[in-house]
Image (cartoon, coloured by chain):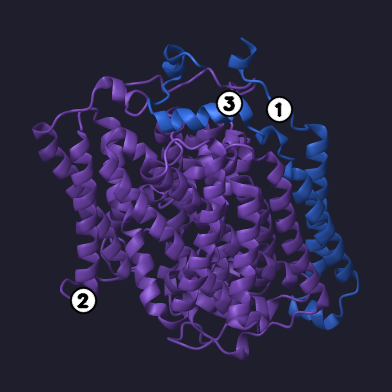
Amino acid sequence: MADNEDRYQGGEAHDPLVDETEDAREENSAAARLFDIRRVIGGLFVAYGLIVGLMGLFDSSAEIDKAQGLRINLWAGAVMLVFGLLMLLWQKVSPTEAPKTRSDES
Amino acid sequence: MGSGLRLNMNALDYLILALYFVTVLGVGFAARRAIKTSVDFFLSGRSLPAWVTGLAFVSANLGALEIIGMAANGAQYGIMTVHYYWIGAVPAMVFLGIVMMPFYYGSKVRSVPEYLRLRFNRPTHLLNAISFAVAQVLIAGVNLYALALIMQALLGWPLWVAIVIGAVIVLAYITVGGLSGAIYNEVLQFFVIIAGLVPITVIGLVKVGGVSGLMDAVRESKLGEAGLHAWQGTGSTDNPLGAHWLGIVFGLGFVLSFGYWTTNFAEVQRALSARNMSAARRTPIIGAYPKLLIPVVTVIPGLIALITVKGLGADQGDLVYNNAIPLLMRDLLPNGVLGIAVTGLVASFMAGMAANVSGFNTVFTYDIWQAYFRRDRPDGYYVKVGRIATVVAVVVGIGTAFIAAGFSNIMNYIQALFSVFNAPLFGTFIIGMFWRRMSALAGFWSLLSGTVVAIATYLLYKLGVISFNSDLEESFWGAGLAFVTVAVVAAIITPLTRPKTDDELTGLVYGMSDTTLKDDSLAGDAAWYRSPVLLGLVAVVLAALFYIPVF
């Protein structure tokens, strides 16, 4: 992208400050090393699901009464656990790879 | 708020909260290795997938004030509160994705003020950069204070403990992890917020006898039948919101919401960090889908609180409308989901404050420091400036929070005042994008005069010189007048001044670039379900359909 004729083909604005940082990004960006957030969301929700779900198993009748007769901890725990596992599964099934753009290939 | 709101948190509830703090900090530190250039720090290296930026986009708006405030509105105004979502947000988000994003993302500008610098001139840029930067820091402080108030009431933490803990955690993960730290945490926060709010809604609905029980009870309440309708009764201002349908459609639905969603850099920044044009355009549109449904966990709990909490709606004390959600947490949630709900409130505060701080550090570094003070330094220098700016923003935010503690009404006014800045900004943007001839000077004078008109309307209303039915009606009219001023000034000054050359406008205005850039698209972006136009139209149609049962 050093050639100016080429640079502005895509509609990029003409500006030295923008060019400078874009060039630095194109040469050195480390953003591809970013981890996958799905793993963190999945992990946290599995932990929350287990904690809240286990609390739900041992809920006293006073707690169940407070929640209008719903075993809300059990339900919320189960839903969070399943959600967390689905996130982990999603990450397993389609892991991120640094995707190539069509222009990279040419 | 007194001690009457105190929640009965046990050790496991605190474990849930602590686990959240650790995770958020961990995300920040883990994001550090992905930062080498300034674009990595400020814009996540423009590398994120659309679902991540889309959820961050909606999360950045889901601050604690938003959740608490919308539940309060639900209790006070009833179903009409959905206007803030379905007409006051979704159409603007879709418009941003379909129409405006090609200019923002395609021109590779690094911020919203930078667009003004390229499209108009440096004075316009500086005016907007400074007003944005100041607003973000002050709003961050107000958010911080709001969080501290809630923590004090719910958990009994002293104000300063809550302020410092909240601020230090946000400071740590943004300083270290940059925008990636902020955005990744926003996605996490989005899910935690929802997980915290859903049990309140579910138990609350069981308590009032389901949706039909809720509707019957609202008819019996002080809102009456009007509390169940969004549009009926808007032929006059005789409805809970005190707003005419013209005001709702043009004031809220057009000028206010388009101003906020399309020009607020704290929002747009999330889209600029997307990995390509297609993902950038889908960012606000993907955000629109959760936005459609959020009223279920804010407005509905507000109505439930109106019915189940006797005396809600007091002028002061524990029973003010703003305590709708905290009161329901106290009354309905057993330990366990209670911990999740408190964590959700803390998460929502952090998401809001992180959006303000990350917007600030980018604008300060690129638009003020680099553009006017220290140009031509190596790229890594600006990462350092950004980190220092983050620290300064948070420290000033803490200071603002303590000032707000002394003058909470004044801070409310300041925040309302800044919301006024968006309407003239949107007017300047939209005319500048679609009217190629609009000159640089016209841009500056339009923005300035529009802003002055908006502020003047607001101040005259506050001083009692002119009167409106409600604050909301004032903001509709203030925004509308500002918009008209921008258009009139642009139309008068442009013919008298020199236009910008075509060369300078490449990529910045309609008709000067190919808006459907193909070169950065990924395999799969052509699939129909990734079409921004289709996704956007479906969101708008859903918003319209959702109105039918509550017409």
Name the residue rendered at 71%, 27% in the picture.
A98
Chain B pictured colour: purple
Name the residue rendered at 65%, 40% in the picture.
B35
SS of the residue under disc 3: helix
Q: Please, what is the three-letter code of the amino acid marked with disc 1?
A: Ala
User: Which chain is indicated by disc 1?
Assistant: A
Task: Tell me residue B425's x, y (percent).
Answer: 30, 48
Return the residue at label 1. Answer: A98
Residues under labels 1 and 2: Cα distance? Answer: 57 Å
Along the line of sight, the residue nearer the viewer: B37 or B118: B37
Name the residue rendered at 30%, 33% in the picture.
B119
Label number found at residue B270: none
Return the residue at label 2. Answer: B463
Residues under labels 3 and 2: Cα distance? Answer: 53 Å
Chain A pictured colour: blue
Q: Residues at marks 1 and 2, common chain?
A: no
Disc on the earlier residue, 1 or 3: 3
Along the line of sight, the residue nearer the viewer: B362 or B58: B362
Mark 1 or mark 2, whichever is nearer to me = 1
Label number found at residue A26: 3
Mark 3 or mark 2, whichever is nearer to me = 3
Task: Tell me residue A42's x, y (percent).
Answer: 79, 49
**In the picture provided, is B398 more to the left or to the right than B196?**
left
Residue A41, above or below B160 = above
Quadrant hosting residue B370? top left
SS of the residue under disc 2: loop
Mark 1 or mark 3, whichever is nearer to me = 3
Crowd rating for badge 2 (residues with CA inside 10 Å; few <14, some 14–19, many 20+): few
Quadrant hosting residue A51? bottom right
Crowd rating for badge 1 (residues with CA inside 10 Å; few <14, some 14–19, many 20+): few
Q: Please, what is the three-letter code of the amino acid marked with disc 3?
A: Glu
